[in-house]
Image (cartoon, rainbow, N blue to C red):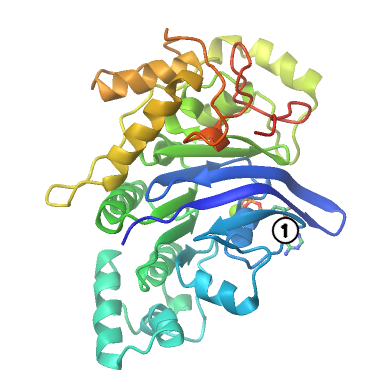
Amino acid sequence: MAGVEVKVEGLSKSFGRANIWSDVSLTLPPGEVSVLLGPSGTGKSVFLKTLIGLLKPEKGSIVINDVDLVRCSESKLYEIRKLFGVLFQDGALFGSMNLFDNIAFPLREHTKKSEAQVKDIVAEKMDLVGLKGDEKKLPGEISGGMRKRAGLARALVLDPEIILFDEPDSGLDPVRTAYLNQLIIDLNAQTDATFLIVTHDINTAQTVPDNIGMLYRKHLAMFGPREVLLTSEEPVVSQFLNGRRQGPIGMSEEKDTAQAQREMAEAGELAGLPEMKPQLEVSPGVPERKAVGRRRERVQQMLHTLPPAAQDAIRRSYANEPVTAMAGGGGPLPQRVPPGAPGATEVLNPGDNPPTWFTGPGRHRPRM
Ligand SMILES: Nc1ncnc2c1ncn2[C@@H]1O[C@H](COP(=O)(O)OP(=O)(O)OP(=O)(O)O)[C@@H](O)[C@H]1O
Ligand SMILES: [Mg+2]
């Protein structure tokens, strides 16, 4: 099985008159792990649900294996959905079914496997997420973290080629989160599936993905190699990565610009980004992640288009040198990626000098 590319272009979603996000374009590179960040309520879960065709966007396209999910027939959509393994934010287990039946559900629904085969697969996945022995329990009888892990097992039973996890780490203790992050990397190595993970866990964002995107103010503010976001000096990124109160993100709404600027000035000494951490590697005995080589080539080709700090971090990571965020970094100034070149869709505002990878209201991305 090889990873599948997911190409999203110009996607917009509203509920009635409430616009959630507009003009979202990104390509999930086949077999790579991507993370989607963003303040609460910015529409991350809505984005995942749109990706699997549960919600219909007003505009744009989602192309997987040459099929546009937004426009295809119901039967085609049903076929394409089988490629996905999804963990919804709330776990979405059936309350009246025990864990075994919950996890077996997609197999019984979508395959013609015998009960003996179903039993083997469910046992293997339950073991994988540490739920061996809990087959008979009902969702109401177990902890939130266990429900989350049962949802994970269910997302994996069909050996999906595209895996969407909505906050798989929320409700897990730090040790289990560390196990989960390692599991994601190992699963990616074993399956070469394409992952998109929504998380609020900064450590997860720092150590797991190949790529990071951020939804902010009804737009996809950025999407690209992890180093771009992790070295970005945009106030919203540094507020987010540092988990600070001061900055553009407020409790319920984005703050007005004047207030945010006052706070940023007051919190001047707090500015800066957390230290960059190395990406997790596969566990001993697990085969290499095929995505690593492909990503390296892809990133190499787009390197000159990236902000200098990101270029520097990438060069250092490939040279196995310690990477310090805010390293500044030299390297040539970014140039425009030719349309159609690998990674071209992920380059925001190419040609700006210095590069503006961060887009928001009023900062428009040129169409390429
Ligand atoms: N089915 C729906 N009908 C109407 N509005 C909806 C629906 N689903 C989500 N919304 C609205 O869309 C917005 C984005 O919700 P979403 O759940 O995607 O946020 P999120 O980024 O996942 O937040 P969190 O980090 O808290 O999970 C919210 O304002 C929510 O009320
Ligand atoms: Mg959500």
Residue at left 51%, top 16%?
272
Asked if 353 appears above or below 67 in the picture, the reply is above
The image shows residue 221 at horizontal and vertical percentages of 64, 34
Asked if 282 appears above or below 162 in the picture, the reply is above
CA neighbours of label 1 inside 10 A, class few (<14), some (14 to 19), many (20+) = many
Q: Amino acid at mark 1?
A: Pro
Residue 364 showing in the rendered view: yes
Q: Secondary structure at mark 1?
A: loop
Residue 169 showing in the rendered view: no
Q: Quadrant of residue 225?
A: top left
The quadrant in which the N terminus is found is bottom left
Residue at left 36%, top 37%?
295
Say left or right for 286 vs 68.
left
The image shows residue 227 at horizontal and vertical percentages of 43, 27
* Farthest-out residue, left: 285
Residue to which mark 1 is pinned: 57
Say left or right for 358 vs 23.
left
Asked if 81 appears above or below 252 in the picture, the reply is below
Q: Nearer the viewer, residue 329 or 250?
A: 329
Residue at left 64%, top 60%?
50
Residue at left 57%, top 74%?
76
Q: Nearer the viewer, residue 83 or 208?
A: 83
Q: Nearer the viewer, residue 357 or 146?
A: 357
Q: Quarter containing ligand 1?
A: bottom right
The image shows residue 265 at horizontal and vertical percentages of 67, 10
The image shows residue 237 at horizontal and vertical percentages of 57, 27
